[in-house]
Amino acid sequence: MEWLDNWGLSLAAFLPMAGVVLLLFVPGSMDGVAKAVGLVITGAALLVGVAVGVRFDYGSAGAIQLEVNERWIPQIDARYHVGIDGIALPLFELSLLVSFLCIVYLLWHVPSPGKAKALIALTLLLETGMTGTFIALDLILFFIFWEVVLVPMYFMIGIWGGPRREYAAVKFFLYTLFGSIFMLLGFLALYFQGNTFDMIALREQGNLGSTLVQNLTFAGLFLGFAIKVPMWPFHTWLPDAHTEAPTIGSVLLAAVMLKMGTYGFIRIAYPILPDAAVYFAPVIGILAVIAIIYGALCCFAQSDLKRLIAFSSVGHMGFVMLGIATVSDRGINGAIFGMVAHGLITGMLFFLAGSIHERFHTREISALGGVLQQMPRFGSVLVYAGIASLGLPGLAGFWGEMLALLGSYQPGAGLDEGLFRILMVGGGIGTVLTAGYLLWTIQRVAMGTVPEKFADRHDLFDVQPLEWSAWAPLLVLILAAGIYPRMVLGVTDGAVQTLLKSFGG
Amino acid sequence: MQGALTSPVDWHAIAPELVLTAFACLVLVVDLFLAERAKWLAMPLSAIGVLATGAATLSLVGSERTTLSGSYEIDAFALLLKGLFCVIGFIVLAISFDYFRSGIRYQGEYYFLLLCSLLGGLVMSSARDLVTIFIAIELISVPGFIMTGLRKGDPKSNEASLKFFLFGVLSTAVMLYGMSLIYGLSGGATRLDRIREAIDGSGNEPLVMLSVFFVVVGFGFKISAVPFHFWAPDTYEGAPSPVAAFLSTASKIGGFVGLLVLMFKAFPEVADIWRPVFAVLATLTMTVGNLIALKQRHIIRLLAYSGIAQSGYILVALALIDPSSPGVSRQALESALVYIAIYAVMDLGAFAAAVAYARRGGTYFIDDYAGLWQRSPVLATLLTGFLLSLAGAPPMAGAWAKLFVFLATINAQVYWLAVVMGVNAVIAAWYYLAVVKRMFFEAPELEGPVEVPYFLRAVMGVAALALLVVFIYPPVITELAERSIL
């Protein structure tokens, strides 16, 4: 198992890249072979991920494990430094799992205009970028992995997307690029304050420059991460990108890529610049609550099912950011839980929205209805995912939101308790609104009578075996994480405690 | 000067230049004896010449020599750039072959001129003397004037050539005037290190500044920095496209090398005064180049304006030089070298793809690139790779080029310039993506696959692969740059 300790993480991250190279030699006409390659590669990467999970020492989840630190670019002291701790592990596993499930889903259906090989290659490239982001411990390495996801997602939206795909793709690209340039400036500022790109070394140094420099650096990082999350008011790319992207694009965006932003806060901005984090916490908290309520209100106004789910992401990520803003044990644990839960649930919802579109050729909520009657299993899954999303206790969505609110009742040291309690109330109102629009949506789509248009459609098929295989892991995990939250919290807590040490806690 | 004529010459040190000169003459002579349909043989002969020059350059690796009484220096800096010029020459030859073979006469003359201009670049890399620098820049430019006008029947080509010539002569005059002032001020010194000594503490700062100003304006035309850029887009558009590719890389880089050497070797003492000038020049060049590029519909014009904007990033390095903190200067020069090397490959790649598309039944209008992905996936993917690299997006080496300039800028604590670069990078991404968007997201209007000559295909493939390799393991180029500091 020696090699696993050293190269397990890198293997999981770069296997998909090797898959892309392999795909170059597959003729474009042989879709079946391309699909097989995709399935085998993502499956193998997932297996490596599982092995990493087994190998991980949960007793010391706060420490960086399976670490590799090799020479890379000596001219600027950038090193190939990867490793994993309790914060990164759940997200690392999530990205491997979701990528695999996306390929499984592709076996069932390749969106127009076909070209499965290219789509699979892009998915693999995305997988490398996503998993790499969660294991990188060097700022430059992190930046590179972060940027790698940009191009494949751009093409995925632009080629396989909906009617307004060009607009959405370019908007996504430019927005993210804009943010990441300021993030990069922040990284470089850190480098010239701390003389290293190593996240761990920077964290241990503490106190990087004057308060002004720290705050400015944090602002740069904030811009980059906040656009990715996305936080209100930087969210406007998200509804377009999510709505226009093909199903697996939306799933990957929602389930994993948004988490890269929140992960950046927890992994980089907070531990390295704790004072600035406390300084900015009220701003982040307020923006987060605005996002929660704004996202929920927007959902009431949506007529497109996919766009509704996209806006619900804004709200859910608001809870995650609220948890992070509290700088408390509960809040941050809740935030990571929220990331995983949102990844599972919203990923699932986007799968469902995609499958609805395949069946009815529309996503207009007003045109749909009575899905439970026509396709009882499909309808049940839809209701299940919707209820999980609104945060019903016993399912995954509950814990993240509850812990975030608990955290804001008692925020970390140095934060204004009064303000955060007001924010808690705001968040609480948000949960009610969330429940409101989700129940209303379920009622309109799943319940009621079948619209005349679809009444004599006998070709509507219930959940297909391949759909089941893509969805079952998500459905099971949503329930498991809801019933047994320690599954995630037990892993994250140790690492969160390490993080809070930077704040003198 | 007298010493230069009588001192012994280190023949090995100037071997690359000698080899290239010999091949240039050979091409011209051989061309006389070739039948019209065998004229294309000039190209393989030139390619062998460039390869031989490259080999001669390689044979000098590791040595530090000075010859011609100190006016000609062979160091890592010079060798890196000579190597780069050879690479550029080879790629341009590859782009030219099919273009000139099927369209235009004067193949022998063209390859002769191309090699001469390339020779100018080689001389520039080693020149450490005002006169040598001047000769080098003229050697680069003058064949360029003629090459631009090779499409004699086309009024656009004539216009391009004339415009380029007039601007070129004007800039030469201004530059020469500045150089003559320096010559007088430094008491008759032409070697850069002597000039530096003479200027230091001479008390003639206003006059020194005036002369530096003239020299910079002269070079400003050569590197097409805003506001001296007006000739470039028209010239590129009118010139045979391979020549445009050559002008936007070799010719421009030659100008940059001259400017870098002058500023680092002769005028660092007055850096405090001209540094802000370069900062403004860089900002203007980047921003104006990018903003005008947004509206271009002709791929060569787009590349011309994008090339102007790219020059801005190299100019940034000149805005960071600070003799009082060697670390900052080192990093600035290092970033400029990395940028120049990566820029040359990605820009030539983009030109190569544009030429490849246009030669076989295509056009230069970006609208006609619609759906290229479905017609010719390999060409579309390659062009996308080069454009993304120019935009600075992974997974191509262009990302590192930009990153290193950012790093140098932050190191010099010129934060506002870093922000300007950041905003410009986003603007630039817009128009590069506009081309990508057409190729991938739109339905084709023209039919049939695009045939790309195998040689050109191979060269583009290698260029793209090189950019990819540098992206994954940047020390390939950064280590070279680090060792090649002036």
Image (cartoon, helix red, strand yellow):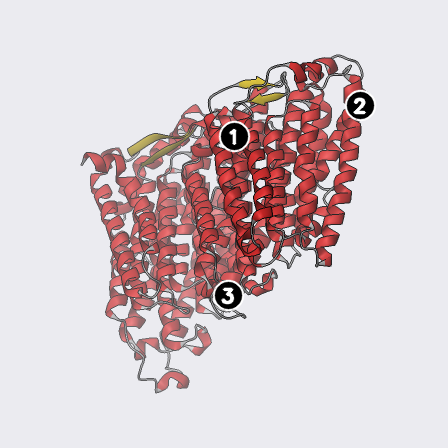
Q: Answer with mark 2 or mark 1, whichever residue precedes in sequence.
A: 1
Disc 3 to disc 1, C-alpha distance? 39 Å
Disc 2 to disc 1, C-alpha distance? 31 Å
Disc number at residue B80?
1
Disc number at residue B371?
3
Q: Answer with mark 2 or mark 3, whichever residue precedes in sequence.
A: 2
Q: Nearer the viewer, mark 2 or mark 3?
A: 2
Residue B263 x/y as whole percent:
67, 25
**Residue beneath label 2, please?**
B181
Q: Chain of mark 1?
A: B
Q: Nearer the viewer, mark 3 or mark 1?
A: 1
Furthest residue to the front? B33
Label 3, residues with CA under 10 Å away: few <14, some 14-19, many ≥20: many
Q: Is residue A234 left or right of residue B224?
A: left
> Residues at marks 2 and 3, common chain?
yes
Secondary structure beneath dot 2 equals helix
